[in-house]
Structures are given as structure tokens and as C-alpha cells.
Amino acid sequence: MSIMVAAVLTGMFAPAWALQDGQPWPVVAVSALLIAGVWALCLRLEGRSWADEGLVPDGRRLGQFVAGLAGGVALVGGLAWLLMLGGVLYWQPNQSFTAPLMASGTAYFVAAVLVEELIFRGYALRRLAEGIGAIKAVVLLAAIFGGYHLRRSSAATTCSASVRARPSRAAAPNCSGPPPGR
């Protein structure tokens, strides 16, 4: 439980100095490493291995990963295509897009997803399911996950309104992420 609390607090209260290219990926990356380290320590103390958690790479798992990745890309691409056909989504070249911005954004999303998976679906889910049952564990972690994102989305909404009112980044030092329209 302490792993979840620490990660949630880190995500909610990342300081403004931790932003890199408008994304708090350094803080998220450190969180991911710390969570993975604590997970490894807990496994060692319990006499379990990475294989017990299903994390030993083999051909079958690699095939499942590739199939899942391809399926996800197809689903998101198909959704975007349907939204473009419906006139909801349109494509427009972004002149300010740069390779470093792409690398920074990719690093942020990889680290953020890793943190969420480790906290809400990894070790904590398995241990809670062993202790209180699978259904209760899923419900509890889903509620915590929802609260985590609710808190983050309400902060982002407040931040966006503040940035729109005063476009200077210095005017909204607690905001994480690029100003709207960027």
C-alpha cells in the first residue's frame, strides 16, 4: 500500500522544476524506477521470482506482446480514421513539432504507463487479491486509480483555464504540461 500512496503523491504533487519540455517525465521516470525497485525487493523478501509474476521473457510472451501492440495500434488507428471520416478529427501539420519533443513525450508516456501498471495492476493487485479476493482487489484498485486520475484531471482543468487567461508560463507555475493550443 505504501508503494501506491508514494506514487500517487508523486504524480499529484510533482514540482514545477521537474518539468522537461512541458512534461514531468523525469519525476515519472524516477517514480517508475523506485516502484520497480521496491517491487523487486518485496519479491526477494517473499522468496518469489520475476517468473512468479509472469515477467520472465520467453517466445510466447513476446508473441503476446507483439500481438497486443499490433492490435492496439490497429484499434487506435481505426478509431482515428473513423473520427476523421465523421469530421470529428482532422489532420493538420504541426510546424512546431520537433524530434526532441517527440522523444520527450514518448519517454513521459512510457514512464507514466509503467508507473500505472506497476501500481494498479502489478504487484499490488496480486497481493491484494491473495489477501482480500480478486473482485474486492480489482474494485479497490479501480477506485484508487479513478481517484488518482480524477485529481490529476481536475488540476489540469484548473491549470488550462489559468493558462488561457494569462498565456505566460511563468504566470501559472503549478501547471504541468504545455499550454493549450501548443
Image (spheres, grey):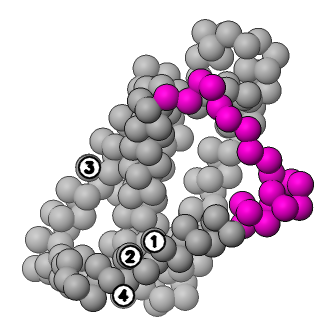
Q: Horizontal and vertical percent for residue 19?
A: 46, 26
Q: Secondary structure at mark 3?
A: helix
> What residue range appears in magenta?
79-98
Mark 3–mark 1 Cα distance, whole angstroms, equals: 26 Å
Residue wearing tag 3: 34
Amino acid type, residue under disc 1 in the picture? Leu
Reply yes or no: does residue 83 show up in magenta.
yes
Q: Please indicate whether residue 25 sits to the left or right of residue 156 in the image.
A: left
Question: How far is disc 2 from disc 3 in space, using C-alphas?
Answer: 27 Å
- State which mark lies toward you, 4 or 1: 1
Q: Amino acid at mark 3?
A: Leu
2 and 1 marks in contact (CB < 8 Å): yes
| Mark 2 vs mark 3: in front | 2
Please indicate whether residue 107 sits to the left or right of residue 59 in the image: right
Q: Which residue is mark 4?
A: 130
Residue type at tag 4: Glu
The picture places residue 127, in percent across and down from the top left corner, at: 34, 79
Quarter containing the C terminus: top right
At label 2, the amino acid type is: Val
Q: In front of the other: label 2 or label 4?
A: 2
Q: Earlier in the sequence, mark 3 or mark 4?
A: 3
Precedes in sequence: disc 2 or disc 4: 2
Q: Residues within 10 Å of mark 3 (few under 14, many from 20)?
A: some
Instruction: Specify the quadrant of the image occupied by residue 88.
Output: bottom right
The circle on residue 66 is 2
Percent across and percent down for residue 58 are 20, 83
The residue singled out by tag 1 in the image is 69
Estimate how packed mark 2 is, as few (under 14), some (14 to 19) or many (20 or more) residues with alpha carbons within 10 Å: few
Distance in Å between CA atoms under marks 4 and 1: 29 Å
Q: Can residue 131 be seen by looking at this rendering?
A: no
Name which residue lies at 44% across and 32% down: 99
Does residue 60 show up? yes
